[in-house]
Image (cartoon, rainbow, N blue to C red):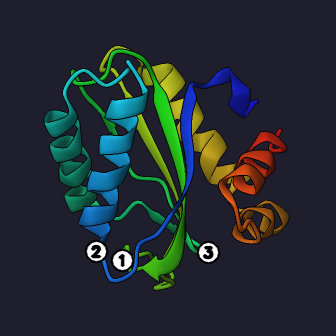
Amino acid sequence: MLNYFNIKMINILENTSISKDEILKLMVSNMYKHSNSVIDEEVFYKEVLEREKIGTTGIGMGVAIPHARTEAIKDIVVSVGLLKEAVDFNSLDEEKVKIIILVGAPKNESKKYLELLSLLSKTFRNKKIRESILESRTTECLIEAVAEID
C-alpha cells in the first residue's frame, strides 16, 4: 500500500547532537536534492516548521510524521529517516523519536494526503514494523524493512 505513494528517500541519519529543526532541515534538503516533487526547499521547510508549531507530529512510540501541504510541493512525496540518536519531538508519550517519516503534499491533494497520514499513523503503531526498522544498521536494510510494509 505504501508503494502507492512517492517514497523518494530512505536514509539512516547520523545525527549526533543536532536538534529536531536541524533534522527536518536535513530531510527537506535531501528531499529537494533527490526529488523533482519539491519546488521550493525553503518554503517547504518553513511550512513544516509552522505545522510543528500547531501541534507535535510525534505520534509516540519513537515515531514522528512531520508533514505539510504547500504550494512548494508539486506531487506527494515521502522521506523516511532512521536516526542514530533519538531526538525530542515533544511527543505526547514524551518518548524521543528515532523514526521520522516526512510528508509533503500539494495544496490540491487533500484526500490522498489525509489517506497517507492515516495509513502511516496506523502502520507505525505496529510494534513489529517499528522494531524491523529500528534494527536496520545500513541504508540497504532500512530500504528492505520499509519495502516490506504492506
Closer to the camera, 138 or 10? 138
Residue, disc 1: 90
Q: Is residue 104 left or right of residue 95?
A: left
Q: Quadrant of residue 38?
A: top left
Q: Quadrant of the N terminus?
A: top right
Q: Which residue is mark 3?
A: 61
Residue 135: image location, x then y, percent: 77, 71
Which residue does the image show at 33% across and 83% down from the upper left? 17
Q: Residues within 10 Å of mark 2 (few under 14, many from 20)?
A: some
Give residue 28's position: percent from left, percent from top. Answer: 32, 44
- Kindly identify the amino acid type of the residue bearing the numbered disc 2: Ser
Identified at 85% across, 65% down, the residue is 128
Amino acid type of the residue that numbered disc 3 sits on in the rendered structure? Met
Judge whether 23 appears above or below 47 on screen: below
- Nearest the camera: 37 or 128? 37
Question: Which quadrant of the figure has residue 34?
Answer: top left
Q: Which mark is residue 19?
A: 2
Q: Residue at x 68, y 22 (%)?
A: 4
In front: label 1 or label 2? 2
For the residue pair 85 and 14, the one nearer the viewer reads as: 14
Whether residue 67 is visible:
no
Q: Residues within 10 Å of mark 1 (few under 14, many from 20)?
A: some
Residue at mark 2 to residue at mark 3: CA–CA distance: 19 Å
Q: Position of residue 86 (x, y in %)?
A: 49, 80
User: Looking at the picture, which amino acid does disc 1 mark?
Assistant: Asn
